[in-house]
Amino acid sequence: MESRIHFLLLRAATLSVLLVATAGCSLLGRSAEPAEDANASSPVIDPRIERREVSPPKIDREDFEVTGYYGMLSVEDFGTNPVVGARLAYHITEGLFAEATLAQTGDVDRTSAEILGNYDLSFGSDRKYKYYDLSLGYNLLPGEVFIGRNRAFNSAFYVLAGAGNTTFHDEDMFTLSFGGGYRILLTDAIGLHFDVRDHLFDDDISGEDKTTHNIEFTLGLSWFF
């Protein structure tokens, strides 16, 4: 009987020790601070983006543009000759513009027939090629051209068509013109133009009636005002 009492007392003491140990572990677990994740304070992508100031040139607020140009004009049957001229454009909208052109060459070259036959098709008249026309143009594919890594200039391709008059060998001939070009804005008010145009008119200067194509390549510098 006595041994049984000792056994029960030993069992009760053991259970008491286990309960106390369990309670102590629980308290220790509650007081411990959770471990911090080393990567939590350093995100993979930094949301802060460093901005840089960019101020590309734009077309000046004024709608008029005057251009002086120089180039080469291939007069059919009369060789290629230097040409100088001026253009005045009015920008109706951002894309559409109207343009007036006035230009002339020096004395055009003689044809091979004139050289071989030793005669002058102009019969002493002025050999300068002069023309003026009015055109409508439209800006296509606006974009930018880059020079180096930090300099960008606004640019655009454009096409145009018009009509006017050509004076050659003292004759006035109704002329249609078609062409296109590429404009680069160097500053807010100054532009650089590369143009290719075809001037078409009917004539019989060479002895037969035909439609002539007179191709012109020019480089111009313009100013907006």
Image: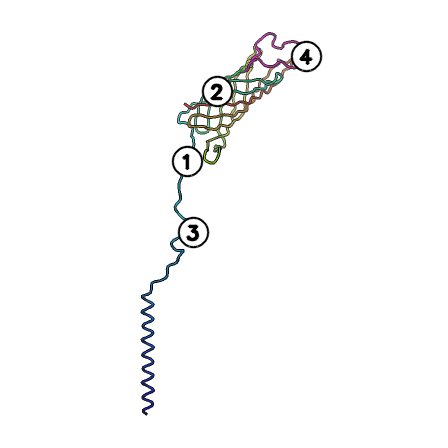
Q: Residues within 10 Å of mark 1 (few under 14, many from 20)?
A: few
Q: CA distance from mark 4 to mark 1?
A: 62 Å
The residue pinned by badge 3 equals 44
Q: CA distance from mark 2 to mark 3?
A: 56 Å
The magenta segment is 105-128
Nearest to viewer (mark 3 / mark 4): 3
The residue pinned by badge 4 equals 116
Circle 1 SS class: loop
The residue pinned by badge 1 equals 54
The residue pinned by badge 2 equals 68
Horizontal arrangement in the rendering, residue 105 relative to residue 207 (left or right)? left
Looking at the picture, which amino acid does disc 1 mark? Val
Q: Nearer the N terminus, badge 1 or badge 3?
A: 3
Nearest to viewer (mark 2 / mark 1): 1
Residue shown at 44%/23% (left/top)? Answer: 223
List x then y, in percent, for residue 165: 53, 16
Q: Residues within 10 Å of mark 4 (few under 14, many from 20)?
A: few
Q: CA distance from mark 1 to mark 3?
A: 28 Å
Depth order, front residue of 58/198: 58
Residue shown at 40%/37% (left/top)? Answer: 53
Depth order, front residue of 212/196: 196
Circle 3 SS class: loop
Looking at the image, residue 66 lies above or below residue 7: above
Horizontal arrangement in the rendering, residue 130 relative to residue 45 (left or right)? right
Looking at the picture, which amino acid does disc 3 mark? Val
